Image (cartoon, helix red, strand yellow):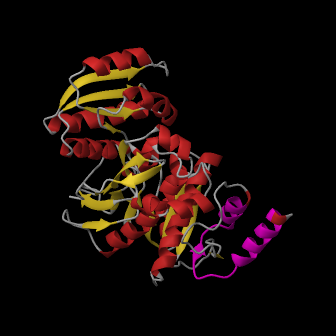
């Protein structure tokens, strides 16, 4: 009964606000189905519902995101709340926001939705979300308005104007980790990775950057099908010439593996190893592992723990992504950024080069059951 009362109060509050969302269906889905809370940290949950099926075009920002399954709806909700949060915080008079849903994984639906947004008055676009969807845009003949795609394409075409890429790609983070490890004195690297599509991409990016930095690969250990030979790893640690370790494994594997790696060599990973701000035992198990985390996550630990639950850290990263996507949409609407452009965002330090926005988080490590900033590492 208490949950129903709270839901009723929220629905009533949605009728009073200064923002526009393009689908009443999306609001209903957020209230009824999504796991995320309706009031995100530092955001105003009040939204005005307006039907975009109108004959008169209205200048607006189109947010084009998928809702075709539960997991995707959760992510879309987090991104959208981040966008609204940033707009609320800035209290600006920039265009209202319309949400356009992609209810299927259909290429024609994406193109039709984008074109319908243009007809309805879209002056800038945030989305789509998936790599396949971004590739679809590149292969279309749409006359684009400034668009912040939330993923990277496999066919970046610098000849196509107004398409920009930004996202949470682990490949870029892996390169930054290689730079961090090298700056802290690493020369000979031991890499330990699980054989999966994601981890293979991570390790490939890391190795490439490490070799570019004149580092050497002393050992490369592949874990097949979650079968870890801990004795073999301990033996290799006793005999290896490596002075640094990088792991690209699942969070659970990292927790099981960490005690066998000892304390002699510094250990690095990606932010995928960080899955909870509140599970102190888990963070103790990952003691001293270094990685990059979003500034928003680092500075909102207490707020996150209270409002978002123990298992929602991955959604919080998408929430921060939405906040920065709004900032970047305004930036590209004002004109094409140059390669010297740099700003501090919620997901990290944002830089621009050749139609892509790159992010670099804060260097942190697990220590005493929490994440701590690496004070000795320069932001440069």
Residue 10 image position (x, y, % from top left): 73, 72
Viewer can see residue 113: no
Q: Tell me the quadrant of the picture where the N terminus can be found.
A: bottom right
Q: Is residue 285 left or right of residue 178?
A: right
Question: Is residue 74 located in the magenta-colored stretch of the structure?
Answer: no
Residue 51 image position (x, y, % from top left): 65, 73
Residue 56 image position (x, y, % from top left): 57, 80
Question: Is residue 24 located in the magenta-colored stretch of the structure?
Answer: yes
Magenta segment: 3-31
- What residue is drawn where x is 68% and y is 67%? 24
Residue projecting furthest to the right? 1
Residue 198 versus residue 299: which sits nearer the camera?
Answer: 299
How many badges with numbers are in the image?
0
For the stretch drawn in magenta, what is the main secondary structure? helix
Q: Tell me the quadrant of the picture where the C terminus can be found.
A: bottom left
Q: Is residue 107 left or right of residue 240?
A: right
Residue 256 versus residue 144: which sits nearer the camera?
Answer: 256
Q: Quadrant of residue 18?
A: bottom right
Up-down: is 299 above or below 217? Answer: below
Up-down: is 193 above or below 5? Answer: above
Residue 340 versus residue 133: which sits nearer the camera?
Answer: 340
């Amino acid at each position: 009964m208490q949950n129903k009362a709270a839901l009723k109060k929220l629905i009533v509050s949605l009728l009073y606000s200064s923002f526009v969302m393009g689908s009443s269906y999306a609001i209903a889905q957020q209230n009824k189905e999504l796991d995320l809370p309706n009031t995100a940290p530092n955001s105003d949950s009040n939204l005005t519902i307006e039907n975009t099926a109108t004959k008169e075009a209205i200048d607006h920002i189109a947010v084009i995101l998928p809702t075709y399954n539960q997991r995707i709806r959760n992510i879309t909700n987090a991104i959208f709340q981040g966008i609204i949060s940033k707009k609320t915080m800035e209290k600006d008079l920039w265009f209202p926001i319309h949400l356009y849903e992609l209810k299927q994984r259909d290429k024609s639906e994406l193109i039709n939705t984008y074109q319908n947004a243009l007809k309805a008055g879209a002056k800038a676009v945030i989305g789509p979300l998936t790599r396949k969807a971004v590739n679809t845009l590149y292969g279309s003949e749409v006359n684009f308005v400034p668009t912040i795609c939330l993923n990277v394409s496999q066919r970046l075409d610098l000849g196509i104007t107004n398409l920009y890429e930004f996202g949470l790609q682990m490949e870029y983070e892996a390169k930054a980790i290689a730079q961090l490890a090298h700056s802290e004195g690493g020369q000979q690297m031991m890499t330990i990775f699980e054989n999966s599509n994601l981890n293979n991409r991570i390790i490939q990016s890391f190795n490439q950057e490490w070799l570019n930095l004149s580092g050497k690969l002393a050992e490369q250990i592949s874990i097949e099908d979650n079968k870890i030979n801990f004795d073999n790893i301990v033996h290799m640690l006793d005999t290896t010439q490596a002075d640094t370790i990088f792991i690209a494994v699942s969070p659970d594997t990292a927790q099981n593996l960490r005690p066998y790696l000892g304390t002699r060599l510094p250990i690095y990973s990606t932010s995928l190893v960080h899955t909870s701000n509140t599970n102190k035992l888990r963070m103790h198990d990952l003691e001293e592992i270094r990685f990059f985390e979003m500034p928003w996550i680092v500075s909102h630990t207490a707020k996150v723990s209270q409002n978002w639950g123990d298992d929602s850290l991955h959604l919080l990263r998408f929430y921060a992504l939405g906040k920065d996507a709004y900032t970047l949409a305004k930036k590209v609407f004002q004109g094409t950024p140059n390669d010297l452009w740099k700003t501090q965002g919620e997901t990290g330090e944002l830089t621009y080069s050749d139609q892509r926005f790159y992010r670099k988080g804060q260097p942190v490590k697990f220590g005493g059951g929490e994440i701590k900033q690496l004070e000795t590492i320069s932001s440069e």
